[in-house]
Image (cartoon, coloured by chain):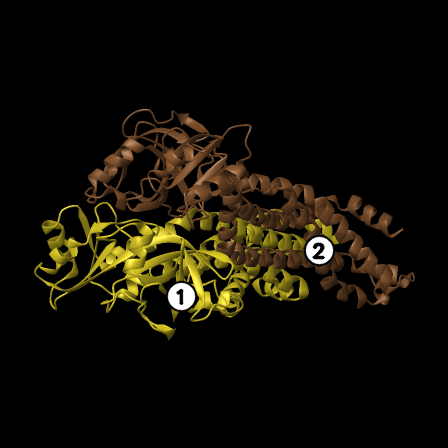
Chain colours: A brown, B yellow
Amino acid sequence: MIVQLVLRRIQSHPYRILLSVLAISSVISLVLVLEGFREGIYQQIRHMVTSRGADVIVSQAGVSNMIASRSLLPQLSRIEIEKIEGVLQAHPLTTLPVIYRQGNRSTPVFVLVYDTLGGPAEIEQGRSIEKERDIVIDKSLSAIYGLQPGDDFIISDFRFKVVGLSKNTAAFFAPFSFISYDDLIDLYFDSDIVGDLSTLPLLSFLLVEVSRNHDPKEIISKIESLIPRADAFLPEQIAENDVAMSRSMLGVVFQLMIVIAYVICVLVISLIMFSAIQARKHELAVFKAMGFNRMGLSKLVFIETFVLTTLAIPIANIFAYLLAQLIHDVAPVYLILSNETGPVVRTFVASLLFALLGSLLSLRSVVRLDPALAFKN
Amino acid sequence: MIRWSIKSLLSEGAGVVASCFGVAFAFLLVMFFSAVFSGESERIVAYPTQVNADVWVMQKGVANMHMAMSQLWDWKQDRINTIEGVKETESILYLNAVIHAGDRDWFTYIVGLTGSTTFSGPWSMHSGKPIPARSEAVIPDMLSRLTGLKIGDRIKIVDKYFTIAGLSSGTFSMANSIVFVSYDDLADIMSAGSTVSYVMVRANEGVSAEKLASRILNQLEKVNALPQKQFIANDHHMAMQMGVEIISMMTVIGSTLALIIVAFTSYVFIARKKRDLAIAKAIGFANQQIYMSVLIQSLTLTFSGLVLSAVFSLLLFPLISVAAPEVFLKVTASSIIEMAIPALIVAAIAALWSARQVASVDPVSVFHE
């Protein structure tokens, strides 16, 4: 009977119910966006490591991260690794943190220097690097600075030419760019420290391709025993290390923001339910006069909240998706994964619980209703 | 009419309170986001601010410290010492790296100090010694608190183990905690002998930092020299810019949420007071007066929410910093004022929405029933 009453009410006040559902959807979508923001940061980090195309990644001994971490491998390690049975090729990769400046604005950029593997996996516009001074930049740099293929891109007073815009090449709040080794050497020569190139990072990582007949884990142990100054990892392993580091940096902040969003959720739902109760005080008083006890009225409020929140969930999903797209368009350096299964399920379960908590706040006014109100005009 | 609108709004009791709190928390979320960026941006410049040099000298093309890489030959420091107006100089090696401390990885800035340093080391100590010897490290006291590591325990930087010799204060931040080691140790890690990252220059009395910086630029090749103020401004500006788009987006999202809450409250209020509004119209109140009353209600709700969010931020943020000491929050007057602009827009749009409803109230409806 209570369920029927709730459904009847929904049918009789469609406009009001629509507004209530939209309000609840907005709050849930906020939580989804925050969850998606966090997931997006982790996903970007994982992608930047795993999309380099290696079966095994070799770093300086003691360095177990790739993003935002400096690694310096001995030059000869490449030759030694390529001698290992099962290794097809070891491709060099160097990371270089730089600051790009244009006008009053500056952005930290991670430059990836590659030769035969490790370049941009997806180029949205233009081409990959072929000639001297070519650079492929992440599309977020194009969005911020209006850069297009053919434009100059100056790093440390050294002039590159943008030839392509890559996508999915930003992580850790910073865009990535791609250059060749020849240009890295020229960049170093243009700076001061050319007397001793060994002081500059020339080889950060080796991206190892393993033959199909060999287990990458077996190659890892061979590399580590052969070259004590190097550590080797599966790409997924090093990606998870980067994610763990990012979690230790940002986890608390996101947790706090999600808590605030849930508080808003509770408040909005209590506001909606409180207004709903106020609007039909008379109707509820009639139920009380008819013999509905506290439990019955409470059930009525709970079921109505449950139905409203359940209706709001799919709309929240759509809102969150649209917001994520909007944020990505405005600030392409961020990726908002608002539809990841884990966070979505978690958010929906939490939203239902918090919705019920919100309805609890409004229950007091139901319990205090005077049945005599039913007989007043 | 204005008195009536405020009185009747207040008579809504718990509904208005929930609405105000909802708006307040929507704005609070935005303020929190902005406070995180402001706090971190301030921490990012803690080191150069505290070192208090007049001029910073670095590699050509480099103009800041945060997430930057700079290398200079160490003999350039000797050359700088001979330039007129230079009182004293100190140099550091500097590296962004992930350190392993207490079973977790932390993104940190490692500063390599020479033994003779007087002003480029930690500026405030919690305990232990400020200048590390070989294989020693001075870590932030907050890192010690978060990891449970104490003086005498070990941390790992790249592939080398370091014994904690001191705990410095004010050097922790989520994005760039500062760990001090000896110059020689860091040079080994970086394979960077005979080079330095930054030279910090103090000027003789009466010599302006700008003049000294340009003198250094004129006399040394392939370097950049910046007065301290500009060097710090570059870092601070860049850190804030990294968050500017996302803060703007969060402001839009938070404000939209506030707008929905205010509009919903106004809608419910007007729906319930339709009869009163019809009477007001029937007895001759002009539409403009009624619109004004609705606008005042929206403004009252929005600004109560805004004021509450400011109060909450002042009360809650220090508590957050106690519960989660790694988060450094900074609320600035400008961030509150910046929130007032979207708040005004929220109030105006919500009022417009409500005015549309008011306009549709038929005075004749008072005679129905």
Answer few, some or many: residues within 10 Å of disc 2's Cα (few below 14, many 20 plus, some between 14 and 19). many
Which residue type does callout 1 highlight?
Thr
Residue assigned mark 1: B163
Furthest residue in direction bottom, as rendered: B127
Q: Nearer the viewer, residue B9 or A79?
A: A79
Image location (x, y in percent) of residue A202: 31, 40
Indicate the quadrant containing the N terminus of chain B: top left, top right, bottom left or bottom right: bottom right
Q: Relative to the observer, which residue lies in front, B350 or B72?
A: B72
Residue B213 shown left or right of residue B369 in the figure? left
Q: Nearer the viewer, residue B359 or B139?
A: B139
Residue at the image position 54 percent from the left and 39 percent from the top = A217
Q: Please say if B249 is above or below A134.
A: below
Q: Secondary structure at mark 2?
A: helix
Q: Picture coordinates of residue B70 (x, y %)?
A: 26, 49
Image spot of residue A123 (x, y percent):
43, 28
Residue indicated by mark 2: A355
Q: Is residue B194 visible?
A: yes
Disc 2 marks which amino acid?
Ala
Q: Is residue A97 above or below residue B83?
A: above
Residue drawn where x is 33% and y is 24% of the image:
A130
- Which chain is indicated by disc 1? B
Seen in the picture, residue A370 relative to B274 is either above or below; the reply is below
Query: Quick one: label 1, few (<14), some, or many (20+) residues within 10 Å?
Result: many
